[in-house]
Image: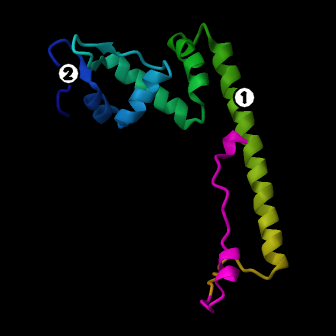
Amino acid sequence: MADFFNEDGCMRIGELSTRTGVSVRSLRYYEQQLLVEPQRTSAGHRIYSIEDEHLVLQIQDLFEAGFCSSVIRTLLPALLNPERDRDLILAAVTAARARLESEKETVEAELRQLKRLGDRYGLAPDTHVTLQDDGHESFTAALTIAFDHRNRRLR
């Protein structure tokens, strides 16, 4: 691995991005959300330390576990001293687990309902419906379905 650190033991945002696999855009977002606070050069360039690298990886783990940035901001100080702040961490993990279990139950119920609908209309799981161009544009346009792509966590 290339040595990304300058003589002061610091790296720039692109170097941190390469080392952590987190995009530059995400790193800027982390800063905007007060999750990381990089130092600045006299020219205003962000510079990061090895501690920032570890922090970014920790933030990434928390995002992957389903936490939002505001909860992560609350948890980060606790993660510096997990023995002292064990109850806060436990409460956050317990709440996240309960939320995901609830979402899982909702998704499973929706999947059961989709199966019932498919059974009712004689649709096998591998059935593919295609539209034939019969010149009825208004009918074809009416069959276009707007799928719900909303993030379930925002419900």
Disc number placed over residue 27 in the picture, else none? none
**Residue 54: percent from the left, percent from the top?**
39, 22
Left or right relative to 67: residue 21: left
Residue range highlighted in magenta: 132-155
**Residue 126: percent from the left, percent from the top?**
65, 79
Q: Residue at x 37, y 37 (%)?
A: 23
Helix, strand or loop for disc 2: loop
Between 148 and 128, the one lying in front of the other is 148
Q: Residue at x 53, y 37 (%)?
A: 64
Above or below: residue 96 compared with residue 127: above
Q: Which residue is mark 1?
A: 95
Give amino acid for label 1. Ala
Q: Is residue 97 magenta?
A: no
Q: Main secondary structure of the magenta part?
A: loop
**Residue 38: percent from the left, percent from the top?**
35, 16
Q: Which residue is mark 2?
A: 5
Above or below: residue 111 compared with residue 48: below
Residue 140, quarter of the rendered image: bottom right
